[in-house]
Image (cartoon, helix red, strand yellow):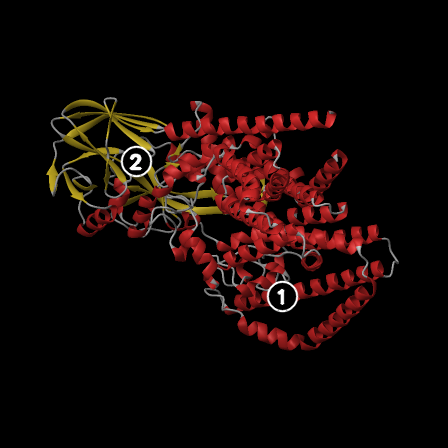
C-alpha cells in the first residue's frame, strides 16, 4: 500500500512538473489579471501582518477599503495544511501545483478502494489531475478553485468509508477533509462537492434497500463528520457570513441577481467541447460560443469519454457507478443554467446559499471528476474481460462505423466548412482582414480537433483489436491506453499553458522578475507616494481595475474584487464608475490617473510619465483634484433619508456641495438638521483603526470617508461605542457633542476571533477521532 501511494505520488509529481516545467524550475509565474490581483493584495497584507502582529481583516487599497478575510481574500494563513507546508517552504504557486498532485492521488486512492486494477486507478486519478479545467484554474489565477477541487475525490473516498463501516477514525478523517476543503474557501466548488455527497447518500440508501431506521446510523455518521467539517472552517465562514449581506453578491435580496448569476451558463450545444476542444473556437478572441467569454474548452478527453461509456455500461449495477451517473446528470443540468432552467431554478430559489453563486458551468468540475472515475471502471473492464464473440461483433461494428464516419467527414469537409463558417458570429470592432483571420482560426481549431479525435479513435480501436485477439498482453494494452489518454489531455493542456502564436492567444506565463518589476515602484507611483497628506487616487478608464497600487500601499477608489461592498457598487453604478468630481471629493480622492487626456476645470495636470504594469508600459497623466476634501470633515446640515438609494439619488440630482450638506439614513430627526462648526485637529491611522481628535463649538456632525460597513467597524466617542449613520450612501457619519473628543473607527475582530476558536476546537476533536479510532482498530487487529 505504501509503495503504491509513493508510486502514484511520484508519477503525478513528474507529470505536473513536466507540464509546468518553466514554473517549477525556471522562475516563471502566471500573470493573468486574476493571478496578479491576489498577488498584489498578498504583498501588501503580508507587510501589515508582519508589522502589526495581527492577522489583517481590512485592506484599505481597493474601493476605498473593504474586508479581507470576510471577502475571501488573504486566506492562506487560515488554511491549516498550507500553514504546515509553509514550514517546509511550500507556498504560493508550488502549493497550488502540489494540490494538483493531491487531486491525482485522490482519484487513484478512491478507485483502488473500489477494487480496480492499478492501471485503471492511475488512469482515473491522473486524468482528473490533467483535466484542462484544473490546468486552466492554475494558469488563469483561480488557485482557490483548483485547490478546493483537489479535495473532491478524497471527500468521496472518506464518505464511502463512513457509509460502509462507520468507524470513528473515518468520521474524523472525513471531518478533516471536508473542513480543509471549506477552508480553501471556494464555496461554490465545495457546494457542488457536497451536492455529490448528498446524491451518494441517497443512492447508497436506496441501493441497500434498508429501512430508514436501519440506515440512520450511517446517515448520522455522515452528518456528524460534515458538521464537524463546518466547525473546522468557521474561522473563514463566520466573518464571511457576517459580511455577505453587505457585499455585492449578497446585498440585493440575499443573493446575486438571476441574470448576473447565470451569465456563464453551459449551452447544451457546447457539450460538444467535451469531445472536440476546438468546436467553439477553444478560447480567447476566437471563442464563439454562448458564454460572454472563456479562456478554455470544457474538454474531457476522447479516450476518457470512450472508457467512461464502457465503464458506465459494464458496471451499471454497481452502486458507486450509479452514483457517478446520477450525480453527473444532476450537476450537468445545473450547469445548463438559464439554457435549461428547471433544475437550476429549483436550486437558485430554494437551495440554501445557492443564489449567491454565479457561473453555473462551474459544476462541470465535478462532472469531469465523475467522467475520469468512470473511465477507470471502463479500463478495468477492458483489462479483465477481452470480450469473446460479443466483443468481436462489437469491435467489427465500431470499426465499420468509424470507417464510414471517416470517409463521410473527408468527403463532406467543404460543406462542413462552409456551414460552420456561416454560424460564426461577427468579430466586432476590428478591421475586416483581422475578422477573417479570426474566422480562419476558428475553423482550424475545429478541423484540428476532428483530426485529433480521428487519430485517437484509430489508435484506440487498434489497441482494442490487439487486446481482443490476444496479440498483446492486457497489461501492455492497459499501459498503452493510459499513455494514449494522458497524451490526449496533455495536447490540450499544452495549448492552454503554451498557446501557439497562430491561435491568437498569448501565454500567461512571465518571468517572476518581470512581474515583480511591473508591480514595483515607477515614476508615477513614486510621485504619488511622495505627496503630502492623506488621500486616495482615482484610476480612470482602463486603469480603474488596476491593483498595482495595492502592492505599493497606495489607497485607491478603484480596484477589482468580485465581492466588493454592495453600497460601493451602487455608487459605481449610479455615477458611471465615479465620473463625478463631487463624489471623488467626498471619497478623499486627491489625484486622478488617466491613460488619455481629460479636460476638466477641477483637474490640474501635474505629471506625464509611464506607468509600469504587468501587461506592459502605459503612458498616463496624473491630475490633482482641486478643492479635495480631507479624510474627515464637519458638515453644516444633514438631511434624513430612508435608504442608500434615496441618498445617492438626491445627492447626485441636486448638485449640492458635499462639504456643506449630506444625506444620512435612519437618523432620529425628520427633514434637515443644522449643526455647529468643528475642526479635525489630528488624525492617527493604523491598519484597523482610525482615530480623529476633534474640537467643536457645539453639537456637530463628523463625516468620515470610510466605507460604511457596520459589521466590520465599531464607532467610538471617547472610548464609548456609538451608532454611526450611513452618509451619502457609502460613508460614516457620527454626531459629536460640544468640546474636544476622540473619535475612533475600530475594526471589529470579535467574529473572526470566535471563528478561530471554533476551528481550532474542531480540528482537535477530529484528530482525536482519527487517533482514537485508529488505536482501537489497531488493538482489535492485535487481538
Q: Residue at x 58, y 36 (%)?
A: 174
Q: From the top left corner, tell me how far across and down residue 781 is, in percent.
A: 73, 28
Mark 2 burial class by Cα count in 10 Å: few <14, some 14-19, many 20+: some
The residue under label 2 is 710
Q: Secondary structure under badge 1?
A: helix
Q: Earlier in the sequence, mark 1 or mark 2?
A: 1
Asked which quadrant contains residue 167, the reply is top right
**Farthest residue in the right direction?**
471
Q: Secondary structure under badge 2?
A: loop
Residue 226 sits above or below residue 401 on the image: above
Q: From the top left corner, tell me how far across and down residue 499 is, in percent.
A: 62, 54
Left or right of 471, for residue 672? left
Task: In this rendered view, identify the residue nearer to me: 656 or 601.
Answer: 656
Judge depth for marks 1 and 2 and give the one in front.
2
Quadrant of the drawing holding the C terminus: top right
Q: From the top left corner, tell me how far across and down residue 538 is, in percent.
A: 34, 43
The answer for how far apart the CA atoms under marks 1 and 2 are is 53 Å
- Specify whether residue 532 is in view: yes
Asked which quadrant contains residue 415, the reply is bottom right
Residue 292 sits above or below residue 130 on the image: below
Task: In this rendered view, identify the residue nearer to me: 151 or 297.
Answer: 151
Q: From the top left corner, tell me how far across and down residue 70 is, in percent.
A: 41, 37
Task: In this rendered view, identify the residue nearer to me: 99 or 370.
Answer: 370
Left or right of 212, for residue 654? left
Task: In this rendered view, identify the residue nearer to me: 305 or 441.
Answer: 305
The residue under label 1 is 446
Mark 1 burial class by Cα count in 10 Å: few <14, some 14-19, many 20+: many
- Specify whether residue 507 is in view: no
Which disc, if any, is residue 213?
none
Q: Residue at x 69, y 24 (%)?
A: 779
Residue 695 sits above or below residue 572 on the image: above
Amino acid at each position: 500500500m505504501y509503495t503504491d501511494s509513493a508510486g502514484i505520488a511520484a508519477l503525478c509529481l513528474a507529470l505536473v512538473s513536466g507540464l509546468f516545467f518553466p514554473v517549477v524550475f525556471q522562475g516563471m509565474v502566471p500573470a493573468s489579471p486574476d493571478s496578479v490581483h491576489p498577488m498584489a493584495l498578498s504583498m501588501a497584507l503580508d507587510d501589515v501582518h508582519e508589522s502589526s502582529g495581527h492577522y489583517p481583516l481590512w485592506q484599505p487599497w481597493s474601493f476605498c477599503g473593504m474586508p479581507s478575510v470576510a471577502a475571501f481574500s488573504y486566506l492562506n494563513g487560515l488554511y491549516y495544511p498550507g500553514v504546515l507546508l509553509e514550514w517546509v517552504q511550500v507556498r504560493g504557486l508550488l502549493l497550488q501545483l502540489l494540490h494538483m498532485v493531491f487531486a491525482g492521488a485522490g482519484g487513484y486512492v478512491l478507485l483502488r478502494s473500489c477494487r480496480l486494477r492499478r492501471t485503471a486507478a492511475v488512469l482515473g486519478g491522473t486524468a482528473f489531475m490533467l483535466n484542462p479545467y484544473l490546468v486552466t484554474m492554475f494558469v488563469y489565477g483561480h488557485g482557490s478553485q483548483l485547490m478546493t477541487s483537489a479535495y473532491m475525490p478524497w471527500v468521496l473516498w472518506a464518505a464511502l468509508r463512513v457509509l460502509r463501516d462507520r468507524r470513528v477514525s473515518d468520521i474524523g478523517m472525513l471531518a478533516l477533509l471536508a473542513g480543509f476543503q471549506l477552508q480553501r474557501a471556494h464555496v461554490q466548488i465545495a457546494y457542488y462537492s457536497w451536492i455529490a455527497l448528498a446524491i451518494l447518500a441517497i443512492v447508497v440508501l436506496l441501493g441497500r434497500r434498508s429501512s430508514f431506521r436501519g440506515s440512520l446510523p450511517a446517515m448520522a455518521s455522515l452528518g456528524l463528520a460534515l458538521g464537524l467539517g463546518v466547525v473546522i472552517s468557521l474561522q473563514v465562514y463566520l466573518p464571511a457570513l457576517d459580511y455577505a449581506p453587505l457585499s455585492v453578491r449578497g446585498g440585493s435580496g440575499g443573493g446575486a441577481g438571476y441574470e448576473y448569476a447565470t451569465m456563464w451558463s453551459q449551452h447544451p450545444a457546447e457539450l460538444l467541447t467535451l469531445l472536440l476542444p476546438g468546436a467553439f473556437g477553444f478560447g480567447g478572441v476566437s471563442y464563439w460560443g454562448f458564454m460572454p467569454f472563456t479562456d478554455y474548452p470544457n474538454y474531457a478527453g476522447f479516450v476518457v469519454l470512450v472508457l467512461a461509456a464502457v465503464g458506465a455500461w459494464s458496471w451499471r449495477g454497481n452502486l458507486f457507478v450509479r452514483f457517478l451517473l446520477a450525480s453527473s446528470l444532476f450537476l450537468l443540468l445545473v450547469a445548463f443554467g438559464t439554457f435549461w432552467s428547471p433544475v437550476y431554478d429549483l436550486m437558485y430559489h430554494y437551495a440554501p446559499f445557492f443564489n449567491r453563486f454565479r457561473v453555473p458551468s462551474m459544476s462541470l468540475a465535478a462532472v469531469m471528476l465523475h467522467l475520469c472515475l468512470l473511465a477507470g471502471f471502463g479500463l478495468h473492464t477492458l483489462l479483465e474481460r477481452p470480450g469473446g464473440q460479443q466483443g468481436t461483433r462489437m469491435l467489427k461494428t465500431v470499426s465499420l462505423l468509424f470507417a464510414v464516419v471517416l470517409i463521410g467527414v473527408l468527403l463532406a469537409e467543404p460543406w462542413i466548412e462552409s456551414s460552420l463558417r456561416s454560424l460564426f458570429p461577427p468579430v466586432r470592432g476590428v478591421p475586416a482582414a483581422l475578422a477573417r483571420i479570426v474566422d480562419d482560426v476558428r475553423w482550424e481549431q475545429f478541423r484540428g480537433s476532428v483530426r485529433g479525435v480521428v487519430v485517437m479513435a484509430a489508435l484506440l480501436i487498434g489497441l482494442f483489436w490487439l487486446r481482443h485477439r490476444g496479440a498483446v498482453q492486457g497489461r501492455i494494452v492497459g499501459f498503452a491506453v493510459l499513455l494514449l489518454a494522458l497524451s490526449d489531455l496533455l495536447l490540450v493542456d499544452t495549448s492552454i499553458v503554451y498557446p501557439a502564436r497562430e491561435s491568437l492567444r498569448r501565454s500567461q506565463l512571465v518571468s517572476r522578475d518581470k512581474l515583480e518589476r511591473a508591480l514595483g515602484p515607477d515614476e508615477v507611483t513614486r510621485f504619488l507616494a511622495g505627496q503630502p497628506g492623506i488621500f486616495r487616487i482615482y484610476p480612470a478608464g482602463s486603469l480603474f481595475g488596476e491593483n498595482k497600487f495595492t502592492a505599493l500601499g497606495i489607497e485607491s477608489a478603484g480596484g477589482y474584487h468580485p465581492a466588493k461592498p454592495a453600497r460601493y457598487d451602487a455608487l459605481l453604478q449610479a455615477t458611471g464608475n465615479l465620473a463625478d468630481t463631487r463624489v471623488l471629493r467626498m471619497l478623499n480622492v486627491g489625484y486622478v490617473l488617466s491613460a488619455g487626456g481629460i479636460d476638466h476645470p477641477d483637474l490640474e495636470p501635474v505629471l506625464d510619465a509611464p506607468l509600469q504594469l504587468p501587461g506592459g508600459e502605459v503612458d498616463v497623466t496624473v491630475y490633482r483634484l482641486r478643492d479635495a476634501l480631507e479624510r474627515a470633515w464637519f458638515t453644516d446640515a444633514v438631511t434624513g433619508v430612508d435608504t442608500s438609494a434615496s441618498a445617492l439619488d438626491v445627492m447626485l440630482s441636486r448638485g449640492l456641495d458635499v462639504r456643506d450638506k449630506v444625506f444620512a439614513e435612519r437618523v432620529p430627526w425628520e427633514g434637515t438638521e443644522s449643526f455647529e462648526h468643528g475642526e479635525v485637529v489630528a488624525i492617527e491611522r493604523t491598519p484597523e483603526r482610525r482615530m480623529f481628535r476633534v474640537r467643536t463649538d457645539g453639537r456637530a456632525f463628523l463625516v468620515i470617508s470610510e466605507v460604511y460597513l457596520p459589521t466590520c467597524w465599531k464607532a467610538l466617542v471617547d472610548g464609548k461605542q456609538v451608532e454611526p449613520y450611513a452618509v451619502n450612501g457609502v460613508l460614516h457619519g457620527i454626531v459629536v457633542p460640544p468640546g474636544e473628543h476622540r473619535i475612533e473607527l475600530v475594526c471589529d475582530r470579535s467574529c473572526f476571533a470566535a471563528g478561530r476558536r471554533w476551528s481550532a476546537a474542531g480540528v482537535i476533536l477530529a484528530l482525536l477521532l482519527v487517533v482514537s479510532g485508529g488505536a482501537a482498530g489497531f488493538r482489535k487487529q492485535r487481538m
